[in-house]
Every structure is written in structure tokens, then in C-alpha cells.
Amino acid sequence: MSDLPVTPDDVARAAEVVPRIAVPTALERSTRLSERYGVEVLLKREDQQVGRSYKVRGAFNLMSSLGPDELARGVVCASAGNHAQGMALSCSRLGVDGHIFVPTNTPRQKRDRIRELGGDRITLTMLGKTYDEASTAATAHGVEHGMTYVHPFDDPRTVAGQGTVAFGLVRDEGEPLDVVVAPVGGGGLLAGMATWLKHRWPQCRVVGVEPEGAASMRAAIAAGAPVALEGIDTFVDGASVGRVGATTYPIVRDLVDEVVTVSTGAISTEMLALYQSDGIIAEPAGAMASAALAVLDLEPGSRVGCVVSGGNNDVSRYADVIERSLVHEGLRHYFLVSFPQEPGALRHFLDDVLAEGEDIVVFEYVKKSNRETGPALIGIDLDRADGLPGLMERMTGSNLTIEKIASGSPLFEFVT
């Protein structure tokens, strides 16, 4: 471990600095998840942190290490939102000017919070479709103006700061957990936590979780070094990173037991369950750890900690979250239906094809300029996922031309 870029001593030193801005967060038992998986699931509530995310820990730890001249020249960063809030708050607390670059898909809620937390100390620029594009612009801006780049994950000081999540967990829990699950974007949180966990609880199984559409850490592990993904899905905006850090990769490679992926549908379903059953507002990245329990091999009765990494979710995104969850659960399906040019065709579909518990939620003619000959896009919600075979059988027996749109196909992505 001594050859790695971050050591347990680094995390311990960060634990003396970070409490100047961060607050202790709870470790709460989830009855829902514990009963579902037959293990004791404890949620580390970093959504309750200052700025509603763990990110302030790393930003403040890095900025606190800077000298007066560096602070006077200002700081710059790129972020999908949460790290930006952490840096904005740190700038306000330390009296430092900062310039923040965020991707154009950053939720409004996060942008508003950045401005609120940073006040007149912060300049905010929206640029690029991904974190990586925003980071390139931020790096160039920092070089041009002599500003220090406050990296969200690829800096030992940031990693050590994020590791204080594990420091607090170990301090407060005392008895070792069998498994700890944390989300992965660039790897800062996972690397920092693994550094401390493997030092204090060497038998603890440490698991990282990435979104299927941005599995940059798994790609790095497979390649033997950080590599750039050709494209990423930005739904999980807090963990959509195209290339993991040179600092975080070797730590994860050597200390983390496994890295798994979860789909956006599974993440969406867990977001809704956290809200409806546990009263927790989690952003997509914040729901990844507990969503991953479904794909992990867990020993019955073991004690499992899951990091709820953030709660900065824009309420306007919930329609998309619900849509993805329904599709994932097999409760929403889309079809192209060609109706014959005869009276009563639609009534036949409603009366003879649909059954109780099957509702049309989308109905649009594909060719709006010629509704008589074009097919209709129909979205149907089911009460139960096992009701699909019966619906398909009735569709086959009708005199209609019906094509089911396969989930994940280009057409499906277009219509949804």
C-alpha cells in the first residue's frame, strides 16, 4: 500500500482538516433492503452532507493545502455538479475566487446550488456535453490564468479527502462491516475509501459500482491502465466519466475486490424505492450502491454498507426516472400498430386486444401528415410484468399489424 499514491496516513491527515467544513453523516439501517436481500444493509448518508454530497470533502482538503500565493491566483475546476458545489462552498469559506466549468446537461438544481453556495466568489461556465469536455476547457483556462486546478478525483489530496467518508464510517461503526459498496465515476471516492477500509478492516470486501453506460474503471482494469471510452451515457451525471484517473486507478486495482455495473433502469427503480420507502432523495449516482445489491453474491446475514453519495436531483428529471424504471421492471412496452382503413379498428384494439390492467399511456401517429396510412406508436403499461405474454398472444390473434419495439434498440431510444 505504501507504493500507492494515497496512504492511510494521508486519509488520517485529511480527517483533521475536513471537519472544518464537512459534517458527520449517519449510518442508517434500511429495513427494505435488509429484508429483500437477507443481509443487514446500512446506508451511509452522504446525501446529508454539506452541499448534499461527499464531494466537499475532497475539494476542501485539496484547497486547504494551497499556499497564500496559489489561493490569491484563484482555483478552477470541471464538474458534473457535485464537486462544483463542494468547490464553491470551499471558495466561499476560504475567501478564494474560483471558476467552475460544468457540462451543458448539468441539472438546473445543481447549477443554482453552485451559484448559491459560491456567491460572488464563483464564475460558472456551461461548456461541453460531458465532464471530460468541460475538464479540457477548465484545464486550459487554469493554465492561461495561472489558477490551480481542483480536480474532482485525479489528485491525491482529493482522494484522501473523499477517504474521510470511510474514516467516519469506521470510527462510528466500530464493528467491521463484511462488505462496503460505493459508486464509481472517476474513482476518487472508491479509491479513498478503499485506502482506509483495507487499512482498518482488511477483511472487508470493497465493491465499486459503475453505470453500464460509463464503465470507465472496468475498462481500465481490463486494459491494465486508464483508457478513454468512445462514448458514454450521461444519465448518471454524477458518475459519467469517460476516463478514470491515473491516481485512482492503481488504488482501485490493488485494493478493491470487484467493480460491477448497473443499468440505468435498475438505478431509476432504486431511486424511486429510496424515495417512496426510505424517504431518501437520491440522485442517480447516489442510488447506484444499493441498486448493485441485486447483482452481488452476498453471504446471508452479512453486514453491508452502501454509500448514498449524493442527493442533488432535479425534480424535473423524475418523469425520465419513472419511464426508465417502468421499462426496466417490464411494466411499460412500446409497439408500432398499423390499423386497417376501416371503421372501428381502434375500438377493436381497445376491446379485444387490451385486457384489464393494461393501459395506453402513449398514442401518437408516426406520420402526422398522413394518419390514415401510417402506423401508430402505442405505449402500454401493465399491472404485472408477467402479463406481457397474454398481451402478445392477443395481439398475434388480432387482424392488426403490430411490431414490438425492442428495449435498447435505436428506435426504442428514439421514441422514449
Image (cartoon, rainbow, N blue to C red):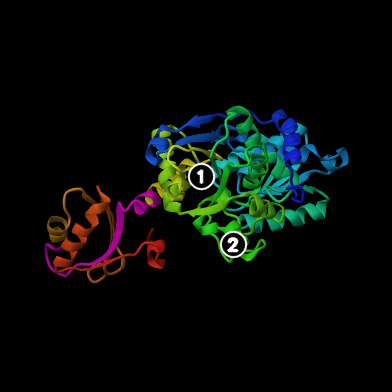
**x, y percent for residue 388:** 24, 57
* Front in this rendered view, residue 92 or 24: 24
Residue 155 magenta-drawn? no
Q: Quadrant of residue 19?
A: top right
Identify the residue position indicated by label 1 in the image: 289
* Front in this rendered view, residue 366 or 166: 166
Q: Pointer 1: residues within 10 angstroms few (<14), some, or many (20+)?
A: many
- Dot 1 or dot 2: first in sequence order is 2
Q: Quadrant of residue 112?
A: top right
Q: Are marks 1 and 2 in contact (CB under 8 Å)?
A: no
Q: Pointer 2: residues within 10 angstroms few (<14), some, or many (20+)?
A: some
SS label for mark 2:
helix
Residue type beneath disc 1: Ala
Q: Is residue 232 above or below residue 94?
A: below
Horizontal arrangement in the rendering, residue 295 relative to residue 343 (left or right): right
Any mark on residue 190, and which?
none
Q: Quadrant of the C terminus?
A: bottom left
SS label for mark 1:
helix
Residue 325 magenta-drawn? yes
* Front in this rendered view, residue 352 or 7: 7
Residue type beneath disc 2: Ala
**x, y percent for residue 18:** 71, 33
Q: Is residue 370 above or below residue 142?
A: below
Judge whether residue 124 can be spotted in this image: yes
**x, y percent for residue 279:** 43, 32
Identify the residue position indicated by label 2 in the image: 219
- Magenta span covers which residues? 324-345
